[in-house]
Image (spheres, rainbow, N blue to C red):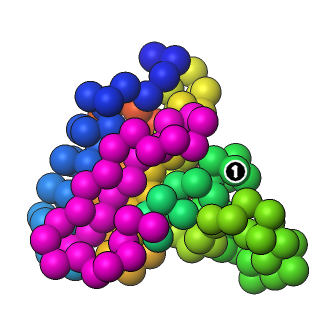
Amino acid sequence: MSELTLAAAQTIITAGLAEARAKKMKPLGIAVLDARGALKAFGAEEDTSLERAAIAEGKAYGALAMGLGSRTIGKMAVDRPHFVAAVTHAVGKLIPVAGGVLVKDQSGKIIGAVGVSGDTSDNDEIAALAGIKAAKLVGDPGSD
C-alpha cells in the first residue's frame, strides 16, 4: 500500500475509539492525515471538549512535519525547548506530546499520521496504535 485510503482511515478511527471504550478512556477525537498533511478523516465521540479536533490534528501534523512521532518531539521540547518553539512557530500547528503517531506501510514508507486527543497523552497514543494496527498498517509513535 503506497497511500492511506479512506477505508483505512475509517478503520483507524473506529478501532481506536473501540480501544478507548474497552479501556474506559475519556471521550476522544481522532484525526487521520495523509502523507501530505491533509485531513483524511476525523471522528469525535460525544462529550469531547471543544478543541479536540485541532489538538488531534496538531499532534498528527507535527509528527508528519518532523518525520517523528510526537512522543519524540515532546522529549525534544524538554531537551531543546527553543528549537521546538521555533519549529512550532514555523509550522503553525505542532503539539509536542504523545498521541501523534506516524503511519507507515509494510515497507516502512510514511503514508500519513494519526493524532488522538482527549485522555492522557499515553492513552491517546494507545488508541492511535490500536487503530493503526487494526488497519494492518505500522504505527511509529517515536521513542520512549
**111 above or below 30?**
above
Residue 133 shows in this picture? no
Question: Which quadrant, please, contains the N terminus?
Answer: top left
Residue 21 shows in this picture? yes
Does the magenta run of residues contain 48? yes
Q: Secondary structure at mark 1?
A: helix
Image quarter of residue 108? top right
Residues 133 and 7: in front is 7
Mark 1, residue position: 65
Q: Position of residue 10 (x, y in %)?
A: 25, 39
Locate residue 104 relative to residue 43 in the image: left or right.
Answer: right
The residue sitting at 32% across, 79% down in the picture is 50
Locate residue 23 relative to residue 120 in the image: left or right.
Answer: left
Image quarter of residue 82? bottom right
Locate residue 136 relative to residue 64 in the image: left or right.
Answer: left
**3 above or below 62?**
above
Residues 114 and 92: in front is 92
The residue sitting at 59% across, 71% down in the picture is 95
Query: What stretch of residues is rendered in magenta?
Result: 27-54
Residue type, numbered disc 1: Ala
Question: Which quadrant, please, contains the C terminus?
Answer: bottom right
Residues 142 and 4: in front is 4
Disc 1: CA contacts within 10 A as few (<14), some (14-19) or many (>=20): some
The residue sitting at 26% across, 28% down in the picture is 7
Q: Position of residue 12 (x, y in %)?
A: 29, 43
Q: Position of residue 66 (x, y in %)?
A: 73, 52
Does the magenta run of residues contain 118? no
**36 above or below 26?**
above
